[in-house]
Amino acid sequence: MVKITDVARHAGVSPSTVSYALSGKRPISEETRLRIEEAIRELGYRPHAGARALASSRSNVLALVMPLRSGINVPVVMQFAVAVVTAARRHDHDVLLLTQEEGEDGLRRVADTALVDALIVMDVQLHDPRLPLLRALNRPSVLIGFPASAQGLTCIDLDFIAAGELCVEHLVGLGHRVVALVGSPPEVYVRGTGFAQRVVQGFTAAADRHRLVSSVHPCEAAPAAARGVAERLLREQPALTGVVVHNEAVLEPLIDAFESLGLRVPGDMSVTAICPEEQAVDARVPVTSVAVPSAEVGERAVELLTKKLGGSAVPEATLLVPHLTRRASTAPRSAP
C-alpha cells in the first residue's frame, strides 16, 4: 500500500507538505503542488478514509439505514442498497450499511460519531419515531419513502398512490368490475409502512371512483399463504376477474394457485403487479406491471444527499411518476 511518506519521497517534499496539499490548510507553491499531484498519479496513492476525515472534517462515508424487519422482501431492498453504493462511489463516498432496528438511539449513536457525513434512511413509516431526530440532526439525511408529513425532511420514492391507481385504471379499461389487492405481509401494515399504505390508498380510491367491487388482502410471503388467499378470494368474491399484487414473494405462487383452482391467467383472471421489472418480465406468465425503480431512486437519493452536503437547496419531496407496462397476464374481461 502506497503511503503518504512514499508520495513525499517521490515528490522531494516533506510528508507534512503532502498533507497540506491534500487538505488545503496551508498554501504551497504551484510548482510543489504539481509535483505532488504527479507523484500521486504515478504511485496510485489514495488517502486513507481516516486521514481524509482528519484533514477535511469529512469521512466521505454515507450511512444507509436499512432495517431488515419482518415482512421485508430482502432481494428487493438489496436492489436499493446496490444502487446507493454504486452512486455513492461515483461521488467518492463509501457506504456504511446498518441493517439492525436502528431507532432514535441508534441513529443518534451513529450521527454523534465521525463515522458518517450523512444518512439515507429506508423502511419509512407514516408516523416514524425517528422523524423528530432526523429533523434535528446536524447531519443531512434523505429518506427513501414518505412519512405522513415530509415537512422539514428530504424524501424520495415512487408515487405509490399513483401506482395503485394505475393498476386499477388498467383493469377498468379492460372491463373488469370486481377487483382485489393482494398486499404486503400483515406486519408491514401494522407498522404503518408508508409505501404499503399508499398502494392501498391508491387502489381503493380508484376502485371507489369507478364504483368497482373491491377488497384488500394482506398476505404472508409464502406460497401456502398465496394459495390460501386465492381460495378465499374465489370463495368470497366469485365474480372476481382482476387482481393487483403488491407482494413480490407471492406473485408467481398466486398465479399458480389460480391456475390450480381452474382459472386461466389471463383468460379468466387478469393479474397486475407493482414489482421490479425483471421479476415481471421473467415470470412464467409475463406480468403486466408498474416497475419499482430501485436504481433510479437509489441514485437520486445519493444525488440529493451530496447536494445537501455541498450546501445546495433541494426539494422536500421527490415523487417518481409510475409507468405501467402491459404484458401477457392481463386481458379483456370475458365474463358477461
Image (cartoon, rainbow, N blue to C red):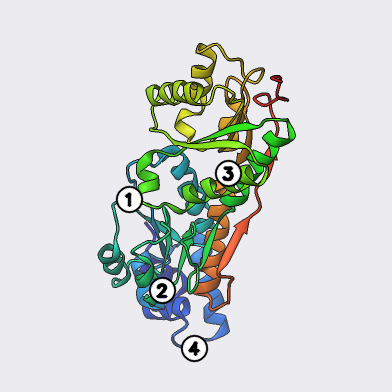
The residues tagged by marks 3 and 2 sit, at their Cα atoms, a distance apart of: 31 Å
Q: Decide: is 161 above or below 178.
A: below
Q: Which residue is mark 4?
A: 27
Q: Residues within 10 Å of mark 1 (few under 14, many from 20)?
A: few
Query: What residue did someone put label 3 on?
Result: 203
- What percent of the width, then of the height, locates residue 77? 44, 44
- Categorize mark 4 by other alpha carbons within 10 Å: few (<14), some (14-19), many (20+): few
Residue at 49% x, 57% y is 144
Question: What SS does tag 1 mark?
Answer: loop
Alpha carbons under labels 3 and 4: distance apart: 62 Å
> Circle 2 sits on which residue?
135
> Looking at the image, is mark 1 or mark 2 nearer the viewer?
2
Pick whichever of labels 1 and 2 is earlier in the sequence. Answer: 1
Q: Which residue is more in the foreground, 30 or 76?
A: 76
The image shows a total of numbered marks equal to 4
Q: Which one is nearer the viewer's eye here, 72 or 188? A: 188
Which numbered disc flags the more N-terminal residue, 4 or 1?
4
Residue 169 visible, this orientation: yes
Residue highlighted by disc 1: 99
Q: Earlier in the sequence, mark 2 or mark 4?
A: 4
- The answer for how far apart the CA atoms under marks 2 and 4 are is 38 Å
Q: Nearer the viewer, mark 3 or mark 4?
A: 3
Residue shown at the point (53%, 86%) measured from the top left: 29
From the image, which quarter does the N terminus lie in?
A: bottom left
Look at the image and tell me whether residue 244 can be seen.
Answer: no
Q: Amino acid at mark 3?
A: Phe
Q: Earlier in the sequence, mark 3 or mark 2?
A: 2
Q: Which amino acid type corresponds to the residue marked 4 in the rendered image?
A: Pro
